[in-house]
Image: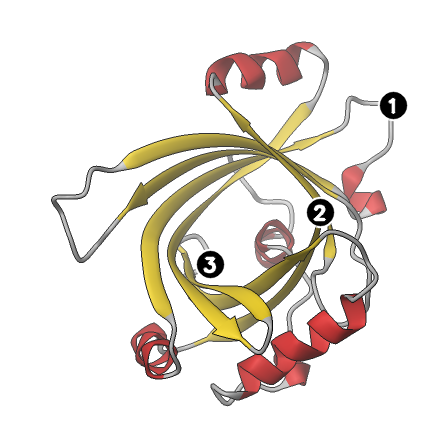
Amino acid sequence: MIEVEIKVRISDPEAISNKFKNHGGVYKLSLEHEDVYFNMPEGLRDFKETDEALRLRKSIEFNKFNETIEKKINYYLTYKGKKMDKSTKTREEIDVKIEDYEKIRNLLRLLGFQEIFTVKKERELYEFKYRTYHIEALIDYIPILKQYFIEVECLLKSSENLEDSREVLFDFLSLFGIKKEQSIRKSYLELITDKFKGNLRK
């Protein structure tokens, strides 16, 4: 699948949440993500240079408005290819749900994959029907950055409608006063690396 994704920085998540609801957004759930990023074994290609990513995710799902709904924990192994354009975070994504998080983590270590850093995210997921598209919009808080972001995305089976999908997402964001030039292409890991410049600790 190809994930067409746009990220922007925001300052008032509550205002954005209200705007989402006013424009037909449906709150689905809240999430706490703990993402462990890996690089290839030494001597092989460097994901930082090739603009790829390999991520092991622990995902806690819950409904912040209804505490009677039981929390769920899921685990995923995800590969992300290099970005496909110069204005968004669009890239190929292969996402595999896994059962045994620690076994997969240990397997990657034994094969020589290098753990780079763990990124924690607090998220709210909203869904929209916009034109003919199903759009997911996330309000994210990244504790280590002490900043809020929006990520909006849709999934494509091929790159055939890539340009149209990208423009639809930018048009969708304009409903909330967000302009194309506010798009951030860097991943959260890249933003963290830029901020701390080599002083990261796992």
The answer to whether mark 2 and mark 1 are in CB contact below 8 A is no
Q: Nearer the viewer, mark 2 or mark 1?
A: 2
Mark 2 or mark 1: which comes first in sequence? 2
Residue receiving disc 3 = 145
Which element is circle 3 on? loop
Spatial CA span between label 3 and label 2:
29 Å
Residue 22 position, x and y percent, is 33, 83
Residue 184 image-quadrant placement: bottom right
Which residue occupies the foreground of this view, 32 or 72? 72
Spatial CA span between label 3 and label 1:
31 Å
Q: Residue sitting at 56 percent across and 19 percent down?
A: 105
Callout 3 amino acid: Leu
Which element is circle 2 on? loop
Callout 1 amino acid: Gly
Residue receiving disc 2 = 1
Label 2 environment density (alpha carbons within 10 Å; few <14, some 14–19, many ≥20): few
Which residue occupies the foreground of this view, 80 or 185? 80
Which element is circle 1 on? loop
Residue 90 position, x and y percent, is 72, 60
Residue receiving disc 1 = 43
Residue 145's place in the image compared with 50, above or below, is below
Spatial CA span between label 2 and label 1:
29 Å
Label 3 environment density (alpha carbons within 10 Å; few <14, some 14–19, many ≥20): few
Mark number displayed over residue 29: none
Q: Residue sitting at 52 percent across and 12 percent down?
A: 103
Q: Is residue 110 left or right of residue 163?
A: left
Q: Nearer the viewer, mark 3 or mark 2?
A: 2
Q: Is residue 53 left or right of residue 7?
A: right
